[in-house]
Amino acid sequence: MTQTPTVSVIIPTYNAEAFLRDTVASVQAQSFTDWELILSDDASQDGTLPLAQELARQDPRIKIVQAAQNGGAAKARNRALQAATGRYMAFLDADDKWRPEKLSRQLAFMAQTGAALSYTEFMRHFESETRHVALPATVDRKTLLRGNLIACSTAIYDRAQLGLVEMPDVRMRQDFGLWLRILDQIPMAHGLQEPLMDYTVRSDSLSSNKVKALAATWRLFHQVEGFGVLKSTWLLAHVIAGRLRRG
């Protein structure tokens, strides 16, 4: 019988051929090795799927789930979550990279704090500069509603404590919606105040369009969280103010 891995790493892929090999390599370079990696391909139209298949042939810890047609990152991540067998669900985007000690440090931190949801700080890479994104030691639901502080590629949740929690089926801000769902169950998420992930800001990414991102945040508040128009707009104003303060 195959032993169940401790961690399931969830990577959604869509036309990610240019970045995927380096991202997967950052998982394979982890000092903590008891993981499975689920690549959830969302009907890519480039060489992503053949590359994923090549990587899976080379490493038996890598699994692939496929979509017949493109449905967005939420569906792709939820397919991977449904296929996952580990206790801890760790998220990584197909163009981000982890530092080698990320899993070992974060899992030890979760064991120490009893955290059901944790996150880390990270480095944000722009074309002309790199910024260390510092974060608070804890965040609760009320605080998070004023702006998402948890980068998806830093987050891990404990399925033993929470059960399987899936992302809301929206095209953008589905990770934000997941953290809010989890924080309905627990008092707070815990942050490891070390930069353990590298995030490159790309001009062609969905999140790079700030107007679309803000509109998606408003829809998350209104359509998923069920807040009225006025409250959704009030919360969005706080999100915008927080972004202006952080720069």
Image: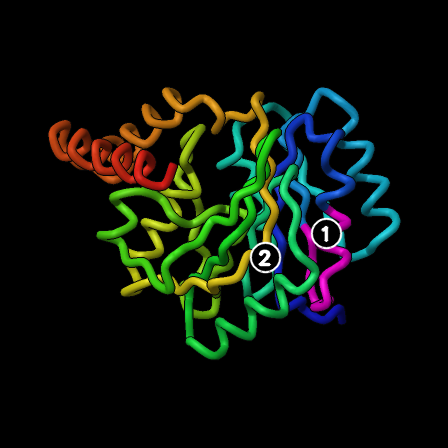
Q: Horizontal placement of 100 versus 91: left or right? A: right
Q: Earlier in the sequence, mark 1 or mark 2?
A: 1
Circle 1 SS class: helix
Q: What quarter of the picture does the N terminus occupy?
A: bottom right
Q: Please determine whether, in this image, residue 93 is positioned above or below residue 88.
A: above
Q: Is residue 242 left or right of residue 203?
A: left
- The kind of residue tagged 1 is Ser
The residues tagged by marks 1 and 2 sit, at their Cα atoms, a distance apart of 11 Å
Outermost residue on the front side: it is 128
Type of the residue with mark 2: Leu
Give the residues in magenta: 24-37
Residue that mark 2 sits on? 196
Q: Position of residue 200 (x, y in %)?
A: 60, 36
Is the Cβ of the residue at disc 1 closer than 8 Å to that at disc 2?
no
Q: Residue 81, can we see it? A: no
Nearer-the-camera pick, 143 or 128: 128
Q: Residue at x 47, y 64 (%)?
A: 192
Q: Is residue 26 magenta?
A: yes
Marks 1, 2: nearer the viewer: 2
Mark 2 neighbour density, 10 Å: few (under 14) some (14–19) many (20 or more): many
Along the line of sight, the residue nearer the viewer: 206 or 164? 206
Relative to 115, say whether 149 is above or below.
above
Q: Which mark is residue 65?
A: none
Can you identify the residue that label 1 sits on?
26
The x and y percentages for residue 60 are 82, 56
Instruction: Give the residue at the far left of this rendering.
Output: 230
SS at circle 2: strand
